[in-house]
Image (cartoon, rainbow, N blue to C red):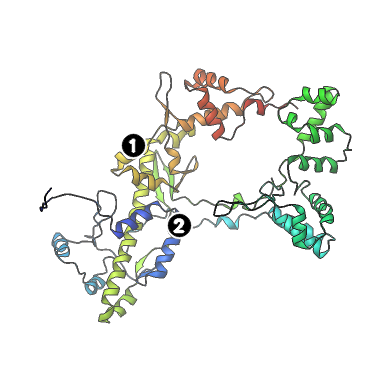
Amino acid sequence: MEIKQQLRLSQQLVMTPQLQQAIRLLQLSRLELIEEVRKELDNNPMLSDEEPDGRTREPGEVRTVTEAGIEDPGVYYKTADQKVRERATREVDWEKFLENRTLQQPPQSSRGGFEELPPIEQNLTKPGSLQEHLLWQLQMSDFTDVERRFAELVIGNLDEKGYLDLAGVERPDGTRTPDLTIEDLAEEAGLHPDDAPLVLEMIQNFDPIGVAARDLRECLFIQARAAGYEENDPVMEIIKNHLHHLEKHNYQAIAREMKIPLEEVYEAAKEIQSFESRPARNFTDQDDRTIGITPDVYVIKDGDDFVVLDNDRGMQRLFINEALTKRLMKDPSAKEFVGEKLRNAQWLIRAIEQRRKTIIRVAECIIEKQREFFEKGVSYLKPMILRDVAEAVGMHESTISRVTTNKYMHTPQGLFELKYFFNSSIRRVANEDIASESVKQAIKKLIDEEDKSNPISDQQIVEMLEKTEGIKIARRTVAKYRELLGILASSKRKRLF
């Protein structure tokens, strides 16, 4: 053990704040980027969204880009001599910078003629939520003030299915609040507990029938009673006592326990299937139709080639606030402040521009590798991983992952997230490998074309895929893909009536 000095030469990547900002901007979605630009406009007085008059870029102006795909934190250089001089000094001559005005204009981006598209919200109407629909009926009903308060509590405790959910909620410390009862709601509203079931029954007969039920059995029972069925009817009996057999299509057990003909069980089951198991099915707090996804890039076919156009619609163009900067530069005490804000403004403008260029480069690489998909459809999607694109564009896989997250591409085949094009490969017999997404679509197509009275099993799908498509996969893989597609098993897809 001894104490001594050693001289060691090593290389390491230093994550400067500017580089961290560039990486963070790269992974932001379009809406997040717009919000980030707005924040920077509010925080940095050197930034402006108004273009200076008469601003043009010098022909000799170039930019440097690092190997990581992020533009060099230096300024634009016109000549090699200026580049050497700039590196030799730490302080930027901002007065000369303002005179030359060489850093204020990001390169022109092609809009592609999409400015005329109307906002999506102008073409859609928003349907009311279930709570709004029920509260409107409550206003039209002859309830007392106390009963109305109780009804509002009931409506406020409905879950996404339209059922009354009075279960306790989990606290931040891991404990749960106690479960509530309708008597607890009545006490909070000032209603007598004996009147709570009657008011709840009135709410359950609102449109849609069966809303505010506490479980599936009560929901179906309310609808059956509203349809005019008596207590001794087979429909009511099956709902009350044999719902577990009905879920498994075990009609023989129902007929044996109820001691009625099997035909009557079929008729009762057919009627029960016509009832709504989710009263809130046609209502939603979030209108899916108004969730408009604005693509980051458009892919348009021009002759035999596919052209990538970036979509800058809705994006604020950033410039240096020259007028304010000139005024502040007259104050010597503000020079340091102005210099820092100008550097931040430059970095933000360049990082946004580099983000745009990187997305376009990745999109062009995807088009090159998935050309058959863009021409013929999903069934021609090829296996592709992040490394394939990373090697083609000369970037790291982590950069490609950030670029493809929450970025969307509008293609002749539809709107897709960039991550959609990255699929694992599935072996084919005597053919090139196929993408897993194509296998999912092949499974979906087979199930869509099946005989609903005699649906095909997972094992049959395995055999059909190998015979028709040359795709050899295991039965458990078919089951996994079927579950990802939201398709039930063959026993539950069988249509009996």
Question: In this orientation, which residue lies closer to the viewer: 328 or 144?
Answer: 144
**Depicted 434 relative to depicted 8: above or below:** above
Residue indicated by mark 2: 32
- Say which quarter of the image contains residue 335: bottom left
Q: Disc 2 residue type?
A: Glu
Q: Quadrant of the C terminus?
A: top right
- Circles 2 and 1, Cβ within 8 Å, touching? The answer is no
Left or right: 471, with 487 as reference point: left
Residue 262, x across and y down, in percent: 82, 22
- Say which quarter of the image contains residue 482: top right
At x 43%, y 45%, the residue is 299
Question: In this orientation, which residue lies closer to the viewer: 449 or 223?
Answer: 223
Residue 493, x across and y down, in percent: 66, 28
At x 81%, y 65%, the residue is 145
Element under disc 2: helix
Q: Disc 1 residue type?
A: Asp
Query: Residue 136: in sight, yes or no?
Result: no
Residue 397, x across and y down, in percent: 33, 42
Label 2, label 1: how many angstroms apart (C-alpha)? Answer: 28 Å
**Depicted 497 relative to depicted 352: above or below:** above
